[in-house]
Image (cartoon, helix red, strand yellow):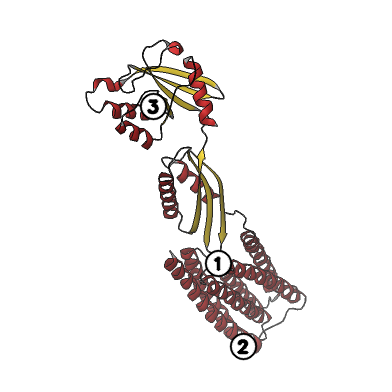
Amino acid sequence: MEKKTSNRLKKGETAAKYSTLVNLFLAIIKGVVGVLSGSIALIADSVHSFSDIFASLAVYIGLRFSRRKPDEKFPYGYYKFETLASLVISVIIIITGFDIIVESLNGISTPKTIEIPLIALSVAVLSVAVSLLLARYKERVGNEIGSPALISDGKHSLVDVFSSIIVFVGILSAYIGYPVLQSVASFAVALLIMYIGLKFGKEAILVLLDACIDPGIVENIKSIATNFEGVEGVHDIKVRRSGPFVFAELHLGTKKRLPIQKADEISRSVEKLIKKEINDLDTITIKIEGEKKLILRIAAPLVDNKGLMSNISKHFAKSPYFLIADITNGKIKKFQIKKNPSLIYERKRGLKTVEFLKNEDVDIVLFEGEVKEGPTYALSDELIKVLSPDGITLEEILLNAAIKEQQ
């Protein structure tokens, strides 16, 4: 897992590095041509590209820190440096949007003509093409490694595409005699830029505050754990995102008498299934708790079939009947008396009786005699507890057993 994590972060780091170099190239060429042509829009777009450089650097630094191994000071790793970088990007996007608004308003009040318009138009077209390719590249890599900072940086590059298109339209409008149209369109794009910045900034802040922003993952974990055999209940599921990874914890309820070895086996199996299903999951902490059943199912071997007036048998596998009762809140909710199906067998009758009780989902069997070694181990494996009858009437014996188990 550690090697896989390192490779993912390294891939994101490489994408951020390439993005920085490409944006540096765009910023310089747009700045030079903007100054030579006198295009305020192209100069503003150059400033915008320089803001992209700082954004890409923030992602690069964040991912670089995220690759550090956990230590005593940061036992959960350095992944949140990547989220912090995402917040920095959001702030840069908002500031850039505000700058474009100011430039747009200035352009509306004092429109200007430009020199060498064909070269300026060519640079704007180049900026559109390169920004589009860069946006798709960063979003693809960001989705592959689950990096919110790289994805948001890709969204920012996608905004650059629209900004460069607006610059192109503005330069073209100025060339044919309508320079004011560029400023109006630039104002609309600036609002879009600020919306994206606020959206990603909000997500980054929520992640830094350990808010649960992935309810789908919570439901997925709950579904996997609940449907696993041996799990009686699932609660206290907590999920938080740290950079490109997810950390989770949950409590699993199992049968109260579950052996430690069996509980550990269930825990490891559930963890394996969840990690297989959720690729972004870095660590999951599972706490096993003995679940108190609201309804206890108690069985008792009987000599006869007289309902609650029946007598308990001193023979386990040879008893002709078994009473099976559901008890809740100190009352017998329902009961039924069944013939012992193991009587037809000559051999392994005790094991067949245990199998019958297992199929009936029995929690406790009442018996005052001695059970052979084989059935005893089988009952233990199936987590069926054996209690001695305590009471005078059968009803009293059943209720006393339930009270004893719930204590």
Q: Position of residue 354 (x, y in %)?
A: 33, 29
Distance of mark 2 from mark 3, alpha carbons? 83 Å
Q: Earlier in the sequence, mark 2 or mark 3?
A: 2
What residue is disc 2 on? Answer: 32
Q: Residues within 10 Å of mark 2 (few under 14, many from 20)?
A: some
Which tag, 1 or 3, sits closer to the chain's start?
1
Residue 360's disc number:
3
Observer-nearest residue: 134 or 264? 264
Q: Vertically, is 150 above or below 297?
A: below
Question: In this rendering, would 276 be left or right of 253?
Answer: left
* Amino acid carrying mark 2 in the image: Val
Does the residue at mark 2 contact the one at mark 3 (Cβ under 8 Å)? Answer: no
Left or right, 168 with respect to 376, comes to: right
The local crowd at label 1, few if under 14, some if 14 to 19, many if 20 or more residues have their Cα within 10 Å, is many
Horizontal side, residue 254 vs residue 205: left or right: left
Q: In the image, which disc is placed on residue 138?
A: none
Q: Nearer the viewer, residue 259 or 185?
A: 259
Amino acid at pointer 1: Tyr
Q: CA distance from mark 1 to mark 3?
A: 50 Å
Of pointers 1 and 2, the one earlier in the residue sequence: 2
In the image, which disc is placed on residue 79?
Answer: 1
Q: Secondary structure at mark 2?
A: helix
